[in-house]
Amino acid sequence: MKKLLATATLLASSIVATQAQACWWWEDCTYTKTKYPIVMAPGVLGFEKLVGFVDYWYDIPSAITYSGGKVYTTSASALNSSEARGEQLLSQVQTILAISGAQKVNLLGHSHGGFSIRYVADAIPTKVASLTLVHSPAKGSPVANFVNGIVPAGTAQSLVGSVVDGMMGILNFLAGNDRPEDSLAALASLTTSGAAAFNALHPNGVPTTACGEGAYTANGIKNYSWSGTSSFTNVVDPLDYFFGLTGLAGTEPNDGLVGQCSSHFGKVIRDDYPWNHADAINHTFGVQGLFAPDPKDAYRQHANRLKNAGV
C-alpha cells in the first residue's frame, strides 16, 4: 500500500493542473469549457517547467482555462522511444483520471508528444475523447533521417548517444525530472522508418495517402492535427537560427523539423501556419513573426472546437 501511495504521489508531482483566472462578465466565460479536461503532452525536451519558471506551453494553458477550460500539463523523458514516452504519459493520464474524476480526457501532443498520445489512445481507448497532434511528425522527420545517416553506427553512435543522454540529464535536473534518457531510441523513433513501424501498430488517424487526411474518428476517438511551414520567423528569436538551419534537411515546406504532409493526422485543421516548431508552443516567451497569428488563439479556438463536438 505504501508503495502504491508513493507511486501515485510521484506521478501527481509531474502533473500540473492550470488554475482558471477570472473571466470578465462581458466575455464568453465558457468558450473553452470542454466536456472533458485537456491533457497536454510535450515533445522533445519533455519538461513541464524548466528552472521553475520557463513553461513548455508558454501561456497556453492559462489562455484555455481563462474561459472555462480545464488543463493538465505533463512531463516526459527529454529523449526516449515513442513507446517509453507513451508509457510515461499513460501513467500520468491514469492519475489525472483518478484525481479529476473525469470519465475521459482530450489528449493534445506537440512534436514527439503526438506519438505519446496515440500510444495512450490505443492503450485505454474508452478513456480518450480526442487526439490532437500539433506539429507532430506522424510520418517521420527529415532531420531525424539526416542525423541518423551522418552518425556512424556502432561505437561512435553509442558514444554520441551517451554524451547527449548526459546533456539531457542536466536538463532533467533543471526541470526537476528524473525520467530515463535514450537519445538513440528517440532518434530511431522519429525517422521515417521508425514512424512507419509505429504507425503499423497505431494506424488510427494516419493518412493512407502521401498528403491526405486520416480518419476523423477512430475507435470512438476524434482525431485532429495542425502544423506550420515557416522555419525562420523572427530575427530576434535565437531558436529561429537553429530551425532555419535544420529546415534545410527537408524537401517539402516545414517548420524546421516537421514536414507539412508528414504532420497530417485525422482532420487537418491547417498545415501552413507561419510558425516554426517552437512558435507552435508560443516560444521563445511568445516571440512570433510580425504578422503571424497568436498561437494561443489557435489553442483556444481548438478548445472551442472540442466543446462544440461534445467532448
Image (spheres, rainbow, N blue to C red):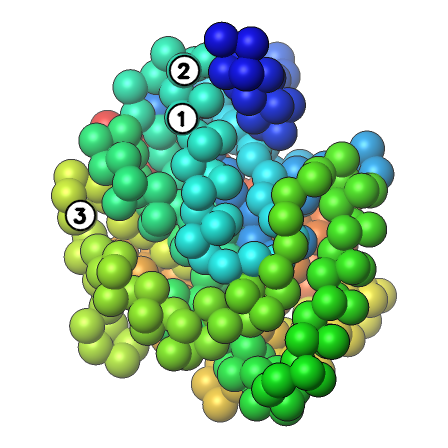
Mark 1, mark 3: which one is toward the viewer?
A: 1
Q: How many residues crowd around disc 1 within 10 Å: few (fewer than 14), some, or many (20 or more)? A: some
Indicate left or right for 272 with 290 as reference: left
Indicate left or right for 292 with 90 as reference: right
Check if mark 2's residue and mark 1's residue have beta carbons within 8 Å. Answer: yes
Q: How many residues crowd around disc 2 within 10 Å: few (fewer than 14), some, or many (20 or more)? A: few
105 or 89, nearer to the observer: 89
Query: Is 17 placed above or below 214 here?
Result: above
Q: Amino acid at mark 2?
A: Ala
Query: Is 200 placed above or below 249 here?
Result: above
Q: In percent of the image, x 27 and y 29: which residue is there?
A: 127
| Circle 2 residue | 98
Mark 3, mark 2: which one is toward the viewer?
A: 2
Visible residue check, residue 141: yes
Query: Is 163 placed above or below 17 here?
Result: below
226 or 159, nearer to the observer: 159
Q: Which mark is residue 217?
A: 3
How far, Cα to Cα, is label 1 from label 3?
22 Å
Q: Which mark is residue 94?
A: 1
- Image location (x, y in percent) of residue 200: 24, 66
Query: Is 66 placed above or below 61 here?
Result: above
Q: In percent of the image, x 27 and y 49: which residue is there?
A: 223
How far, Cα to Cα, is label 3 from label 2?
25 Å
Indicate left or right for 6 with 283 as reference: left
- Image location (x, y in percent) of residue 137: 44, 67
Visible residue check, residue 262: no
Q: Secondary structure at mark 3?
A: strand
Examine the image and state in which quarter residue 153 appears: bottom right
Q: Secondary structure at mark 1?
A: helix
